[in-house]
Image (cartoon, rainbow, N blue to C red):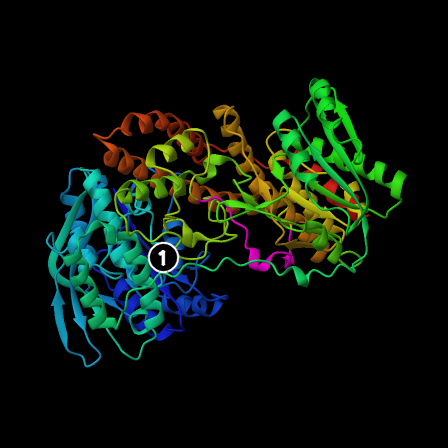
Amino acid sequence: MFKITVIIATSNGRTDLLFDRALNSVYNQTFYDNVDVIIADDTDSIEPLENILNKKRINMAGKMPTRIIKNSRTKKHSGTGAWNTAALSCIDFDNLEETHFIAFLDDDDSWDSNYLSKVADIINSCDDPNDIGLISCAINFINSNGVSSVLYPSEETLTLENVFIRNPHIQGSNLFINLKVFLSIGGFDESLKSTTDRDLMMRYIEFSNIRKNIKTFFIKEALVNYFYDDNLNRVTNNKEGKSQGLDLFYRKYDYLFDKKIKEKSLERAFKLFSYEPFKYIELQDYKIKKNNEDKNYNKFNLILGFICFDENNIKELLESFFCLNFNDYIKDFDICIVSSIDYKERFDLIINNYTNKCSINLKYLNDKKSISKNRTYLQNFIYDYGHNKYASDFVTWIIDDDCRFYSLYNNEKYYINYFYYISKYLNTDIDCLLGVNSGDIPLPFFSALRTQLLDLSYHIKTENYDNVCRDYVSLKNKEYYYDLSSKDFDFLEYPILNFYGTVEDNIKSLKQACIFTRQIEADIETIGSLGEKSIYRGCNTIIYNSELLKIDNFTPDDNSYNRRSDFNWAIINSVLLDRNIISINLPIMHVRYHDNFNLEHELKKIDNDLIGMIFYRVFKFMCEKIKYDNKEPSFYECLEYMNNELYKLKTKIFFNINRTHALNDIISSLLNDTLYYNQYKSFEFYIDKVLFLLKSFCENNKLSLNKEVYNSTLNKIYSYLY
């Protein structure tokens, strides 16, 4: 048995075409068993479309159930975000063994009534439908004058060389693809504003060459009507969007071909789209203008606070801190540190080097507690110390112990006048600033596994190619490193050709859990600029209102939930207590030590991080309902909300599992018969462990909102409101 989901992306208000042409042709199919339809829309409100859909389906009973969803990913990039949103919503964790196909249709095109029937015949003729990668039929190409011609995709058109030069005649409306294959090749690249179909086919060909069992079928009948209308708002009519897509397409693939092939491709692009190749220009080395730093701001008392259980971290952190210039903005400063009694002898020796510079106060705990309890203990320690010495006249800067007081720019240290910016927002209505970081990701290393493998695969392919364009676009201050985040989806299939060292060096870095391409660089053009209100507290928190220190880092327990207790702290302060917490582009360096890398510890961090990511969303939902709607959400409302959020997270994880498996196979194939092969194969042990954990998270219910957690969370909320 197999399932088919029809996916239609829509935008630009093309409602008439969507319902009268595209959807009509779907509902008129002669084959409709186990077929449903998803319409993904870019607009903020889908209610108008739902009203029209309800009227259209009055006499359809249960045939082809249809739903309209919002595009929750990248918008205005040729439908890529909407298509990927819809595809991920097809993942059914209760039926993962079922063969699921997705059939794309543009909202201004149509299908012959036998299209799905012809496709189903091919599926039924195969011994194993899971081996079917893609089925494509001929296209009836209809121009704006109503003149038609037939375009035939075939084995001859679907080659790397042909796709690089020209359209393989497989596009949005005749693309019928296995869902798992679609996920394995990375879905649509959301960085592209055009040329998305050709890019997808380049990756499909690469994947099918590696996975020899994958079969491609072609139907030599024109079962799809592609309407080319010059008056419609479409990508092919948008010169800027077309150029951007081609720029990135050539950046990704031109190293594969010789000069003659490139010239053919560029000739066609110029003839059809007046495209001219992008000329790479080095980005200017922007520097902060020192004369903009007004030194007339009020001086302030500062307490630096952190928790530390690492000798290297405390040594290097203090060393970098005392390199800063305190004279212009600091009246007095102190350091408060929380650690374990096990480190007392060594830590005392280190801090003795700095006791003549300021007061350094260490609290040694008898044992390590949970992250949330340690954070709360540190905050209480700073609050009591600060009020005893300064009353309320002090600023608290809380950081993680693996931070350093400089930033990363062009892969070098970049020094910032931090105290100037802290002073600048003194005596304003800001209660707290949440700064960013640069350098290594402050999250579990393996959360960036997919993108690191993508970059490694491109490094291997381009190692002996001199003309690869490095750092093609500005990548500053992006959160593309976190594969499971909800930000910057457009970077997931976008390779960062930002290599330092050889392929061997990069494989070694991966084995040591070290990011080698996607380190976070400071956006030095906007350093010190304020962002929006935020709850995304991380390793860099500047607190002006000391009352915030009294708020504990709430979690329902000390184990599974405590990885995101910093977000819960911000939610209590901002939502329940109306405090003004603002993001700021004031990065500090995050340094990850890899010589004592512990895989089991890393895996546990990922597991807990995923659970914490869901709980903080539920906690925020409950806080906002009670505070703003004056309504206590029921246990079942919260459970439904949690399950919806959990499903969205699991779909992204499942996407990454499939893509990471494929990238691993591609890299192994590329390295076969090379000196790097055995070195990489030893890294596969880590990949297998991570993917097993992520697969387990998808298949097992590791997060359950029971009545006890629900009630304790309600009690916590009410304790701050009343």
Residue type, mark 1 in image: Trp
Residue nearest the observer in this picture, 40 or 27? 40
Residue nearest the observer in this picture, 444 or 263? 263
For the view shown, which residue lies furthest in the bottom direction? 145
Q: Is residue 524 above or below residue 240?
A: above
Could you tell whether 211 is left or right of 248 in the image? left
Q: Is residue 277 above or below residue 468?
A: below
Q: Which residues are drawn in magenta?
A: 518-534
The residue wearing badge 1 is: 83
Question: For the residue carrying disc 1, how many other residues have a C-alpha within 10 Å: few (<14), some (14-19), or many (20+)?
Answer: many
Q: Quadrant of the N terminus?
A: top left
Q: Magenta stretch: residue 532 in it?
A: yes
Residue nearest the observer in this picture, 129 or 278? 278
In percent of width and height, residue 720 lies at 78, 46
Could you tell whether 703 is left or right of 506 in the image? right
Residue visible at 46% across and 67% down in the picture: 43
In percent of width and height, residue 296 lies at 79, 60
Residue visible at 43% across and 58% down in the picture: 74
Q: Is residue 483 above or below residue 294?
A: above
In percent of width and height, residue 687 lies at 38, 30
**Residue 35 seen in the current view:** yes
